[in-house]
Image (cartoon, grey):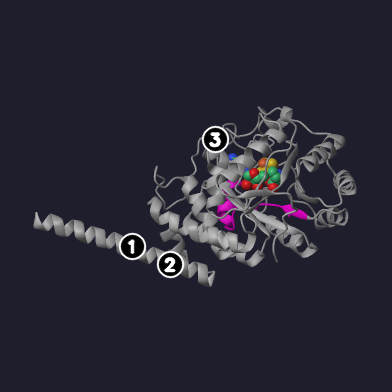
Amino acid sequence: MFCRGRLIFTVRKRKRDDSLELKKTIQKIAETKSITEEELANILIIAEKEKREYLFQKAREAAERNYGKKIYIRGLIEFSNICKNDCFYCGLRKSNNRLDRYRLTEADIVSCADYGYELGFRTVVLQSGEDLFFDDDKICRIVREIKKRHDDIAVTLSIGEKKRESYEAFYEAGTDRYLLRHETANRRHYENMHPENMSFVHRRKCLSDLKEIGYQTGCGFMVGSPGQSIHTLYEDIEFIRELQPHMVGIGPFLPQRDTPFGEQTARIEGIDSTEENSIVDSTLILISVLRLLFPKLLIPATTALGTAHPMGRELGILAGANVIMPNLSPVSVREKYLLYDGKICTGEEAAECINCLRRRVEGIGYQIVVDRGDCLE
Ligand code: SAH
Ligand code: SF4
């Protein structure tokens, strides 16, 4: 009996010591804005909710110091699901012949932006597969038209890898921002997720071109993509430090059944995914870590996070995210932009969507604001 009592005492003490250690590590990361691979591993394996809460609280404080309780919104216009690429994880890949393909017209795209403006959006994100039908002239024409109609709107493009000259032309036409997730900073991992004709080096070159040209640039990655490990995640953080993007988008990898990764489940090598420590938890932990390391970064609570968990976007904000990207695409095409299975908000009109999100965001003590939502330099 005595022995058992001692054992419980020792375990409790160790737990308290662990908690203390962890708090110290989190404080150190927040103060020095640096992290070692070992610290990242120790944080990613936290299985207890209470311990994670301390991390989230610190991340919220960092977000609040810079952005208050403001949540920026970007209206996403998914204008084509046609893609010349064959990324192994994505439902839009060209070899997926089960997908019903669509393209919006230029007039449709502009009227989606008009509608978004009316609803209070001051940023629109034009996203698509790599669809060569939309050549540089068409893209520039669309951007110019949106900027002409609304001089206080920011236009973001997310249309994949292009030549430097194309990026320059889009910038000249008035594009403010560009989102191109780097997907992974580890070459082997990248090659594991893409066919041979896609190049790790070219993707990085695109990102450095975008930064050099002057875009507010966003990179990012999926959490739990096949082949990801604590080490590759550490490399992602190093890469972000080097690139100094304005935004980093991360969301869980979600399998799409008609892709080569359709049978995979999201998982980080070296971490046992359990009910207490799921891929959603890992995503939230990584959002917090990014917030502590890069306090001014724009970090979206992604639709993928909202798909993986019914409260995903709220949890993302409570872990330090400060952007959400509701869908402005016409409802008739939403289900066809199927990057992954189970995508949320495919049935609602944008107005309903934004009202619902406004309520949900207010419910956790934050406010959606009518603002371009530029990154603080
Ligand atoms: N074609 C452009 C933009 C569309 S894809 C591009 O590739 O940059 C936008 C992002 O969706 C990708 O960068 C990828 O990170 C994410 N995505 C694709 N398939 C996904 C999946 N199965 N699960 C989660 N995110 C996915
Ligand atoms: Fe195309 Fe982008 Fe999907 Fe790759 S991730 S297949 S480039 S839409």
Secondary element under disc 3, as helix, strand or loop, is: loop
Residue name at image x 77 percent, y 49 percent: 122
Residue drawn where x is 87% and y is 49% of the image:
147
Q: Is residue 33 above or below residue 303?
A: below
* Label 3 neighbour load within 10 Å: few <14, some 14-19, many 20+: some
Q: Nearer the viewer's eye, disc 3 or disc 2?
A: 2
Tell me, yes or no, if residue 332 can be seen here.
yes
Q: Which residue is mark 3?
A: 262
The front one of 343 and 3 is: 3
Residue 330: give x, y in percent of width and height.
Answer: 75, 32
Query: Could you tell me residue 2's position as x and y percent?
Result: 9, 57
Q: Which residue is mark 1?
A: 18
What amino acid type is highlighted by mark number 3? Answer: Gly
- Is residue 190 one of those drawn in magenta? yes
Badge 2: few (under 14), some or many (20 or more) residues near its Cα, within 10 Å? some
Identify the residue shown where x is 51% and y is 47%: 224
- Which amino acid does the dot numbered 2 rest on? Thr
Q: CA distance from mark 1 to mark 3?
A: 38 Å
Where is 43 relative to 226, above or below?
Answer: below
The yes-or-no answer for disc 2 within 8 Å of ligand 1 is no
Q: Amino acid at mark 1?
A: Asp
Vertical position of residue 128 compared to residue 203: above or below: above
Instruction: Tell me residue 10's x, y (percent).
Output: 21, 61
Count the marks: how many? 3
Q: Measuring from the top left, give residue 249's x and y in whole percent.
A: 62, 51
Q: Which residue is mark 2?
A: 25
What element does badge 2 sit on? Answer: helix
Quarter of image, ligand 1: top right
Q: Which residues are magenta?
A: 177-195
Comes first in the chain, label 3 or label 2:
2
